[in-house]
Image: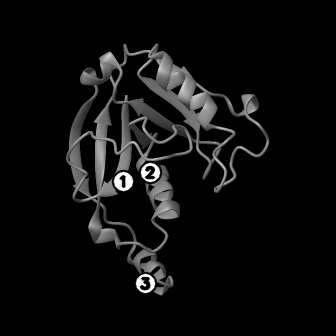
Amino acid sequence: MIVFRIGHKNYATSLTASGVNGRWAAAGRPVIYCAENIPLAFLENMVRRQGVGFNHDFKITCIEIPDDLLISKVDESELDPDWRDPYDYSHCQPVGNRWFDDLRMPVLKVPSAVMPESSNYVINTLHPDFKQIKLIAVTELVPDARIEDILKKYPGA
């Protein structure tokens, strides 16, 4: 399976994780967040970017997860109704933290808070099978120029 992430050009060429606080993993748990397709990866990036940087500052990273790796799955029906709150990760972090800490599966499939009908993938960089996950390509991010125009109008950009 191929998954995608949109990342700053300075960090797009390696499979590294900062370990910062995120929806599915508390600070100190280095995970890589990916999406099932490029449009979803772009939307996820846009809502987090909040006016910081323009499209030419970002790249698309294509990551291969071997088909034989086990993937844990979180179904939206298992989550609290407020799980999508952009400022409160308390509904999702316990689920992701348990998955991260138990080291049973290297990848966690989760619903996207941006588009819940779609899926994101969280990769545990400390899992023993992480070495099987490969960065296979880094390509240019070239969305419609109108999106760049929207970013330029954002205060603080």
136 to the left or right of 39: left
Scheme by which the image is coloured? one colour
Percent x, y of residue 130: 30, 23
Residue type at numbered disc 1: Ile
Labels 3 and 2: the sequence-earlier one: 2
Q: Are marks 3 and 2 in contact (CB under 8 Å)?
A: no
Above or below, 56 against 102 in this view is: below
User: Which label belongs to residue 49?
Assistant: none
Query: Which residue in the structure is indicated by mark 1?
Result: 6
Amino acid identity at mark 3: Lys
Q: Is residue 43 toward the left or the right of residue 31 in the image?
A: right
Q: From the top left corner, tell me how far across and down residue 96 is, in percent.
A: 56, 31
- Mark with earlier residue (1, 3): 1
Q: Amino acid at mark 2?
A: Ala
- Mark 2 and 1 residues: CB-CB less than 8 Å, in contact? yes
Kind of element beneath mark 3: helix
| x 53%, y 30%: residue | 109
Residue at 49% x, 70% y is: 50
> SS for tag 1?
strand
Residue 147 point in image, percent of width and height: 45, 74
The answer for how far apart the CA atoms under marks 1 and 3 are is 19 Å
Other residues around mark 1 within 10 Å, as few (<14) / some (14–19) / many (≥20): many
Residue 41 image label: 2
Give whichever of 7, 16 is nearer the camera: 16
Q: In x, y percent, where is residue 86?
A: 64, 56
- Residue drawn at (46%, 39%) of the image: 36
Residue projecting furthest to the right: 81
Residue denoted by label 3: 152
Badge 2 or badge 1: first in the primary sequence = 1
Residue sitting at x 39%, y 42%: 19
Q: Secondary structure at mark 2?
A: helix
